Image: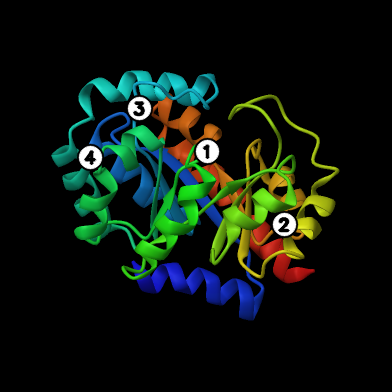
Amino acid sequence: MIAEHQKIIHQVKSKKVPFLTGYFVGGDPTPNETVQYIKEAVKSGIDAVEIGIPSPNPFMEGDVIKRCHARTYPHFREVEQIRAFLKTLRNEVPAPIWIMGYYTDIIASGLYNKLVGDNLIDGLIIPDLPLQEMFQLRQKLQKQNVSVIPVINNTMSNGDLKLAIAEADIIYCQLYQGKTGSATPDFSGLPLFYNKIRTLTDAVLMGGFGVKNLQLAKEVIESGFEGVVVGSEIVRIIEDQNMQHLSEFIKELAKVKILHEEE
């Protein structure tokens, strides 16, 4: 939803309200159940929904998300399945929908054109999108009110960072190097990372990788980032098919917004 996507940006910039992004693999464990898990997560405090498109080669993922792609891809891989799922999600979930996946599966295949044409998504997150294509794709999709959300990290040169974030409205900041779902990382250097990126852009900055609990979410927000992305822990809970646990986990994470308001 364009309005919901812009609402996040407005709340961050005008009211300084942090937001939570939740990552879910589309079709896990079934398309209908994915929708139900997402509805519960949004009800419990998730502000933006990131949908992973299952891949036969999720080479940048950690074990939890790799397992999910492996069990989901065989039964959720056709374009019409993905479109039908996103149509249902669009109708039932009052939150922006950002899809995340690999260049081969989303860009080279042309899938993104169908999803954009049907007004089913508000953003694209393609971690292996070549930098030379980033700006061109962003220019193209801005006309259709779809954001290209870059994934950046602290090892990138200033030149590459500038290419990646040029005219971006929201940026996904990878909080540590490595694969998703790794051991709890050291976030002590996050303020420096945030300040480095903030000098280059006024876009909304959300931090992800390694956020497994409220304390780590607080560290991300207190470092300056306006949003927190949670992925592997959500996928792990859904792997156990525990709706109540998911609701409790999100409600606990959402306290970061209340704590922020009290400070």
Q: Secondary structure at mark 1?
A: loop
Q: Give the number of the mark in front: 3 or 1.
A: 3
Which quadrant, please, contains the N terminus?
bottom left
Q: Quadrant of residue 257?
A: bottom right
> CB under 8 Å between callouts 3 and 4?
no
Marks 2 and 1 sit apart, C-alpha to C-alpha, by 17 Å
Residue 187 percent location from the top left of the image: 79, 41
| 187, 125: nearer the viewer | 125
Residue at 42%, 31% (x, y): give it.
238
Q: Which mark is residue 221?
A: 2
How many numbered discs, if any? 4
Residue kind at label 3, given as amino acid type: Ser
Residue kind at label 1, given as amino acid type: Gly
Q: Which mark is residue 32?
A: 4
> CB under 8 Å between callouts 3 and 1?
no
User: Label 2 neighbourhood size at 10 Å, few (<14), some (14-19), many (20+)?
Assistant: many
Residue at 65%, 25% (x, y): give it.
182
Marks 3 and 1 sit apart, C-alpha to C-alpha, by 16 Å
Among the two numbered marks 3 and 4 on one chain, the one whose residue lies closer to the N terminus? 4
Among the two numbered marks 2 and 3 on one chain, the one whose residue lies closer to the N terminus? 3
Residue under circle 1? 231
Residue 212 percent location from the top left of the image: 64, 37
